[in-house]
Amino acid sequence: MSLRDSRGSDPAQALPQVPQVDGDQDQDQEASHSDERYRLTHVSQIGTVLRDLAWQKCLLSVRSRNGSEIVTSILHVDPAQRTFVFDWCRADGERQSLMASDQNAFSGLLRGVPVNFIVGTPGATRFEGGPAFIADFPEKLYHFQRRRHFRARTLLTKGYRCEIRVQDGSDTRVMQMDIADLSLSGVGLRSRAVGAELLPVGTTAKRCLLDFGELGRLELDMQVVGHWMVGYDDNTVHHYGCAFLNPDGRMENFLQRLVFALELAARG
């Protein structure tokens, strides 16, 4: 990884010092925006959250379409078959209601963070000698993660850009995307042209170039950890959440100053 100040000076002196900011202070503001930013659709991500729910023995509320509600927990997750097993309910009325519903909404907390998802009609199975329900993985799952760091949004008029290079066999595919926001741990990127098939969740990209114009440029490795759509119809854009991979201390100092400078510019 490397970093460069576009004015040729040391980036540690290019921007003012930034105070430490508690990331949880930003959570309420983030929650007021579309929940789609917390949507997981990749099978491996959904499976990871379901396994965590099972491992932590989290209690989940399940509400069927007709309003009937039970409390259960996930007993087993099968990523290969994309199914999970959850605890049986003793009351016949509740069981019949659940198995007659084509839409059952799960909600609960994983380490204090809300999780919710919807599955179709569950089936009956056996688990460790007792009755249990089995259901297919949900198509999407919402995991309202707490942010580790404050996130500053950029001004679109500034035209800050990121260049990502991804190996495609023996070829290298180069993609240009707009920078939407920045934190010490990652960056938000947007594009109308770069869809999920070109940049799937889980992709690792080496030596990505982030260009912040007069504020400086930096080059580092990162991984795509989330993808969702923003807007509708002709205004729809792809938004990617990317995590930085092992930035060193000097890089973190520069990122800290960049975040502060972007926040000052946004407050104008």
Image: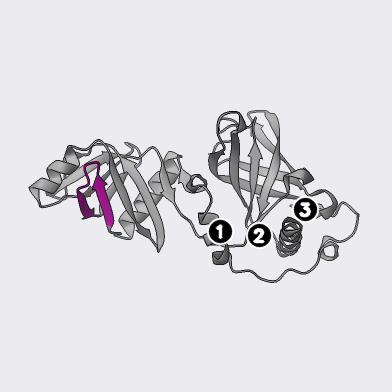
Of callouts 1 and 3, the N-terminal one: 3
Q: SS at mark 2? A: loop
Horizontal arrangement in the rendering, residue 219 relative to residue 185 (left or right): right
Does residue 89 sit above or below 252 in this rendering? above
The amino acid type found where label 3 is placed reads Ser
Q: Nearer the viewer, mark 2 or mark 1?
A: 1
Q: Residues within 10 Å of mark 1 (few under 14, many from 20)?
A: few
Q: SS at mark 3? A: strand
What residue is at 42 percent from the left and 39 percent from the top? Answer: 43
Q: Nearer the viewer, residue 133 or 236?
A: 236
What residue is at 37 percent from the left and 50 percent from the top? Answer: 116
Of callouts 2 and 3, the N-terminal one: 3
- The picture places residue 45, in percent across and down from the top left corner, at 44, 45
Tell me which secondary structure the magenta stretch mostly adopts.
strand
Residue 156 on the magenta segment: no
Q: Which residue is mark 2?
A: 184
The amino acid type found where label 1 is placed reads Gln
Tell me the tag on residue 29: 1
The amino acid type found where label 2 is placed reads Leu
Residue 65 on the magenta segment: yes
Mark 1–mark 3 distance (CA, rounded to whole Å): 32 Å
Does residue 136 sit above or below 54 in this rendering? above
Of callouts 2 and 1, the N-terminal one: 1
Q: What segment is highlighted magenta in the picture?
A: 60-72
